[in-house]
Amino acid sequence: MSDTTVNCDAVPALPTITATDNCSASVKVSVSQTKVFLSTTCSNNYRLTRTWTASDDCGNTATMKQVITVQDTTKPTFTITPPGDTTVSCSAVPTPPGNLSATDNCTATSNVKISYSQTRQSITGACASNYQLIRTWVAKDECGNTNTVRQVITVVDTTKPVIDPAPAAVTVTCGGTIPAAATLYATDNCDGNFPKKATMTTDPYTVDACNGYTITRRWNVSDACGNAAIERVQIITVAACPKPQLDATLPVNCSDNTKFALQLLTKVNKPTFTLQSVYPAGTVTTPKSQTSNVFDLNGATQATFIVTDGVTGCVSDPVTYTLQYVQKPTVNLGNDTAICEGNSVTLDAGAANASAGYTIKWNTGATTQQITVSAAGTYYATVTNNGCSATDSVKVTVNKPPTVEIRDTTICDGMTVKLNAYVQGASYTWSTGDTGPSITVSTAGTYTVDVSLKGCTVTDQATVTVATAPNVTLTPDTSVCPDQTVILQVEPDGGSVKWSDGSLTNSIIVSKPGDYWVTVTKNSCVVTDTVTVTNKANISLDLGPDKDICAGGLVVLDATNASAISYLWNDGTTDPIKEVSTPGIYTVTVLDKYCNLTSSDSVKVTVAGLGDISLGNDTTICIGQTLTLSVDAGTGNSIRWQDGATTATYVVTATGYYKVTVYNDCGSVTDDITVTYKQCEAKPDFPNAFTPNGDGNNDTFKPHVNGPMYDYDLRVFNRWGQVVFLSKDQTKGWDGRFQGSLVDVGTYVYLLSYKNTAGGETRIVKGEVTVIR
């Protein structure tokens, strides 16, 4: 039997072998089989050696061998076939199956291993969002036989980007503000460059404020594969501004008035009035434009005007006016006049006006050419000719005779008296020949004055008598202590006495300060004198402001006063001068040597001291941040920073060495700190929840950032994909509101795009935040 090589599932069965012998009738055949493995890793590769031995009765033997080499060369078989090649959209890539299995004819199923790998490769000539996924499954038995299958998934980007909704269509009234163009963003399920701004274009239009116009804004965007989003459109209708209108009528002018005032029927902004033509031609130079509605037409009989709105530029239709003139009367009532009480004056509106048949009307109601008046007032006469009027007025003043009273008087010998007849605006004639309002006389006699004012004259007179004056002696000015009295005395030289308090005695007793006058009358000559009584005031005692002393020092307190007769300090000492070296409140009481009254004053003495101060350790912070240094100087001490600032706090904004000194008259203490600024990367850190309940804690949602951010764009979406918050300012966070109301409690998705440097790579951070209340 020959040697052979077979597969593991084709090992031949052990055959039955017989043998013969020429001498022996009975030959026995025995068989043995050995198995030797050919590999330590594959139990399916081995060698079977079969040996047959024939023995006769005499012990003679014959041997035959067969070597069978067993090798596992069959690859495993997949029992569940992997999915076939397919073409899908980028948002519909299938998940690789997880239930694939394989069997092997020689190896137990549990020993057949399946490996999986996936590679992505670009498609030549296609956009970046179109590519192929190559998925490979390899089944391997324990002898290394493999079976490989592949699936090719072609990913094609066929989905259009989606642009944010366009702003609603609006109508802008005349003069209204055109709304600023909105910035719309687009999202795309495949293109990694999204979200990004949509491109806005505006259809051509002509601004026509007077007829109105339309502005059409369009937003478009395409992804890298050329898929164009559905265009967003906003229509802005600018309403036409109203056309100015001139009032077609003008009033009739008086003959002396060549100026006409145009009137508007509609509201016109900053109007400009234009005179286009006049008749007769040349009366006024045309065209003539001005902002005033009043034109001097220089006697023209016809004029054509337009008006232009200074804001909208809209122009009215031309209006032609026929200009009419009426002869204006002339009225002259003369100058204002004055009459004395009881007299009258005649006022005349003009004989020419009366003879011409013009209408005359006085403000008294009279319609005659003349009126006679005796009452004060302003009188008006209006003369009218066919609606054209002229008015004049005259003021009539009725004056009362002036009131003059100069009294009889007695003066002492050698004295003078002033006789005063003053009346404002009057003129004077005295019997002495003087013409002033007053005269001064020293001799006895009767004096007469005539006072004339506005046509009225009155006369008055006074008799002056000269008498011998008494010789009066009065107590000189004096002073009085509180709660004490003083005697005031007069020697009247035989005259009668009367004090200011009504006393008729030669002396009075007073206890209060003030002016006390006394009148002595003798022979109708009166002499008055006054004595002043002042208060003997308390001692003015002042130890000065509170004192600060340095440790181990002293201060001198001086209470010396010329009006004091004794001193008593609160520590029992009686010297007016005291040296103090310990803190405390020191009080001194002194006794007045005039009125026996006491006065006190106090001063506080404090030992000045300086405590320890600290600005902290040297530190490094991010550019854009600030550091506030603060120091507690203590009471009565001063602060000085390295740049001369004296505030208790100092705000640091730049790298540098900062030093503060706290000092007083006794010394100083100093501390310093070095602050270094460095450029920090933004690295936004988001909280995973916040509580917008208005309690001032964790009320807003935004990232914590160290460092600059550019092109910042934070959006928060609800579970329906609706944007509930958008901010391009990293300092502003979401307050949990959408369209003015707090959102429901739940989880929301955020998307942040930003750049660490201007023009740098865009970075995107996504995540979820939970609203809690």
Image (cartoon, helix red, strand yellow):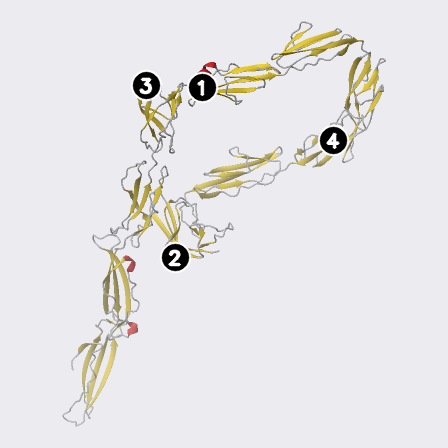
Residue marked by disc 3: 283
Q: Quadrant of residue 465?
A: top right
| Label 2 residue SS | loop
Q: CA distance from mark 4 to mark 2?
A: 86 Å
Name the residue type under label 4: Lys
Secondary structure at badge 4 equals strand
Mark 3 and mark 4: Cα distance apart in space: 104 Å
Which tag, 2 or 3, sits closer to the chain's start? Answer: 3
Q: Nearer the viewer, mark 2 or mark 1?
A: 1
Give the CA separation, mark 2 to mark 1: 91 Å
Q: Where residue 52 sits: x, y (%)?
A: 20, 85
From the viewer's perspective, is residue 2 above or below residue 188? below
Of the numbered discs in the image, which one, if any, rests on residue 719? 2
- Foreground residue among 382 and 20: 382
Q: Please state the horizontal and vertical placement of residue 21, each as a whole percent of the image.
A: 15, 91
**Res 578 label:** 4
Q: What kind of element bears circle 1?
A: loop
Foreground mark, 3 or 4?
Answer: 3
Camera-nearest label, 1 or 3: 1
The numbered disc on residue 249 is none
Which label is found at residue 358?
1
